[in-house]
Amino acid sequence: MVTREQARAIVAGVPDPEIPVLTIEDLGILRDVAIDDEDGVVVTITPTYSGCPAIDAIADDVRTRLHEQGAERVQVRAVLTPAWTTDWMSEAGRRKLREYGIAPPGRLPLLQLGVACPRCGSLDTRELSRFGATACQAQHVCQACLEPFDRFKPH
Amino acid sequence: MNDVATYALRLGDDALILSQRLAWWSARAPELEEDLALTNVALDLLGQARPLLARAGELEGRGRDEDALAYLRGEREFLNLLIVELPDRDFAEAIARLLLFSTFQLARCEALTGSADELIAGVAAKAVKEVAYHRDHAVRWTLRLGDGTEESHARMQAAIERLWPYAHEPFAADELDLRMAGEGVGVDPATLRDGWRAFVAETLGRATLGVPADGWAPSGGRRGEHTEGFGFLLAELQSLHRAHVGATW
């Protein structure tokens, strides 16, 4: 058996399959870890976007890691409410995103002068496309260093 | 099916069928970014449809899950609005439909965030920001095409004219809508019409496009009476699942 604290630490380290530099805790999609007499370890997660295809992979990873660490029964629940927003992303998560080359989302409500290029820091950037390679990102380009980059959409 | 199950199924079918139509644009859009955009919108809609279908199946109590409802119902059992199922003859029609439908869907989601059904309220609250983004995408393209070249203007105007008759059905409340609104589960769509019309007319005006005259207003989607192209859409959606019963990967 694992304790709640152990289970929490194990689950918190599960990476996001689409942006593997972030853990599900950094992203703010890990809502709760509890121990239940009947269900064993109960992990509650929430999708970033309604159709986020990563959510099933994340649930599988959570189960696998917990089983490997000795938890026999594991329940993963995906809840929709309250709806996730980018405000739930941790400061560590924002820093890791920037270092990875993805512009992190601004804080909501939106008060932002511009999107800073994660490579050179210039604010002289523009949006190339409102949609990107994953549901949570848009494509931008830096007009100073000319590098294209992804931006985590404020949501 | 009870009222709430049927209501959840209507909402879910609107999202599921539009998702399928938009997915058709993958590798067919005018530019690569637009392939990604329309399929991203489709993905959001699919994500909204899944819990609604699951909820409908759970309330129905006959053991049908989201897959059974999506893949194993016949044409007459689908309850989506006609506007989401129409095939696109060009890109302008895809954009016109996204503008007309997502403007309606956004108002409906905002109203449903207060639904007495916890699942419907949760899906609506999650969908509000997604659908606002979809509508914004449609507005940008409407402006670009309407206020673009002679050719793009003509095509965008033709697309709006073709879809306009189907833009009335979403606001025609039937008895189920009124019962659900009365019980605080749903919303009377007729109350959303003025706001919808004002937003659409303002957008079309900015895009130098005319607002078509109201006239013929086909309906029937909520009763399972669909247009000719719907059977072909379902064939594409369902054939794999039906050919390989119970298959997983």
Image (cartoon, rainbow, N blue to C red):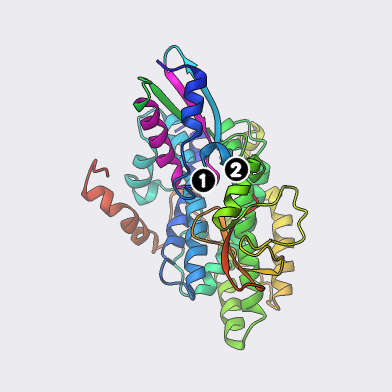
- Residue A135 or A65: which is nearer the viewer? A65
Q: In the rendering, at what x and y percent does residue B137 appear?
A: 61, 64
Q: In the rendering, at what x and y percent does residue A90 appear?
A: 63, 40
- Disc 2 target residue: B126
* Classed neighbour count for the residue bearing mark 2: other residues with Cα under 10 Å, few (<14), some (14–19), many (≥20): many
Q: Is residue B25 above or below residue B238?
A: below
Q: Is residue B150 above or below residue B160?
A: below
Q: Secondary structure at mark 2?
A: helix
Q: Secondary structure at mark 1?
A: helix
- Which residues make up the magenta segment? A39-67
Q: What's under tag 2, amino acid-wise?
A: Lys
Mark 1–mark 2 contact, CB under 8 Å? yes
Q: Which mark is residue B84?
A: none
Q: In the rendering, at what x and y percent does residue B43 appear?
A: 48, 53
Looking at the rendered image, the quarter that the N terminus of chain B falls into is top left
The quarter of the displayed image where residue A80 is located: top right
Q: What's under tag 1, amino acid-wise?
A: Gln
Q: The residue marked by circle 1 belongs to what chain?
A: B
Pointer 1 and pointer 2 on the same chain: yes
Q: Is residue B142 visible?
A: yes
Q: The residue marked by circle 2 belongs to what chain?
A: B
- Disc 1 target residue: B48
Looking at the rendered image, the quarter that the C terminus of chain B falls into is top left
